[in-house]
Image (cartoon, rainbow, N blue to C red):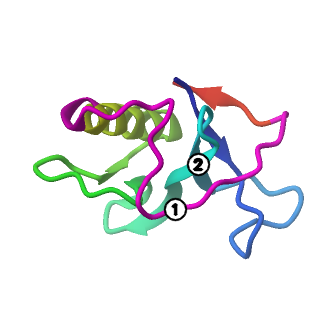
């Protein structure tokens, strides 16, 4: 099932005309917040950080750094689906212990 990047509607939202550097990750099927992808400063320069929130992933990374947004989306999705498979949960019904439902905008783009 697809995941969606959603520009936050809270204090992290940038002024109009600036490219977003902070996204919420939402499961499309459950419309539930499952993580974040954002650009951050590191000793290696600016990098994208992805982080799954609400679920603990023992023996698997639940966050990481990448050089591109596309790599962060891919790594997030892979880690999320690996955890679902290991725990026997499915993306269509699972709602993280922590997190919240969100209203999705029809204009938001999905990724897998």
Instruction: Indicate left or right for 87 with 40 as reference.
Output: left
Which residue is pictured at 73% across the width and 76% down the height?
11
Considering only vertical position in the picture, is 75 above or below 21?
A: above
The foreground one among 108 and 88 is: 88
Q: Which residues are magenta?
A: 85-107
Image quadrant in which you'd find residue 98: bottom left
Earlier residue among tags 2 and 1: 2
Q: For residue 35, which numbered disc appears in the image? A: none
> Which class describes the residues within 10 Å of circle 1: few (<14), some (14-19), or many (20+)?
some
In the image, residue 29 lies at what x, y percent? Answer: 60, 32
Q: CA distance from mark 2 to mark 1?
A: 7 Å
The foreground one among 7 and 48 is: 7
Residue under circle 1?
A: 99
Which residue is pictured at 41% across the width and 44% down the height?
67
Image quadrant in which you'd find residue 22: bottom right
Instruction: Indicate left or right for 80 with 110 as reference.
Output: left
Kindly give the residue lying farthest to the left in the view shown. 59
CB under 8 Å between discs 2 and 1: yes
The foreground one among 17 and 93 is: 93
Image quadrant in which you'd find residue 87: top left
Which residue is pictured at 26% across the width and 39% down the height?
83
Task: Find out whether residue 91 is within the magenta segment.
Answer: yes
Q: For residue 32, which numbered disc appears in the image? A: 2
The foreground one among 82 and 89 is: 89
> Which class describes the residues within 10 Å of circle 2: few (<14), some (14-19), or many (20+)?
many
């Amino acid at each position: 099932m697809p995941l969606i990047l959603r520009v936050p509607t809270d204090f992290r939202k940038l002024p109009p005309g600036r490219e977003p550097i902070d996204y919420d990750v939402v499961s499309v099927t459950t419309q539930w917040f499952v993580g974040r992808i954002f650009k951050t400063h590191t000793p290696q320069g600016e990098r994208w950080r992805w982080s799954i929130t609400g679920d603990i992933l023992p023996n698997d990374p639940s966050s990481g750094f990448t050089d591109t947004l596309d790599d962060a989306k891919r790594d997030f999705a892979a880690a999320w689906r690996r955890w679902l498979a290991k725990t026997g949960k499915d993306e269509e019904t699972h709602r993280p212990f922590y997190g919240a439902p969100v209203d999705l905008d029809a204009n938001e783009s999905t990724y897998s």
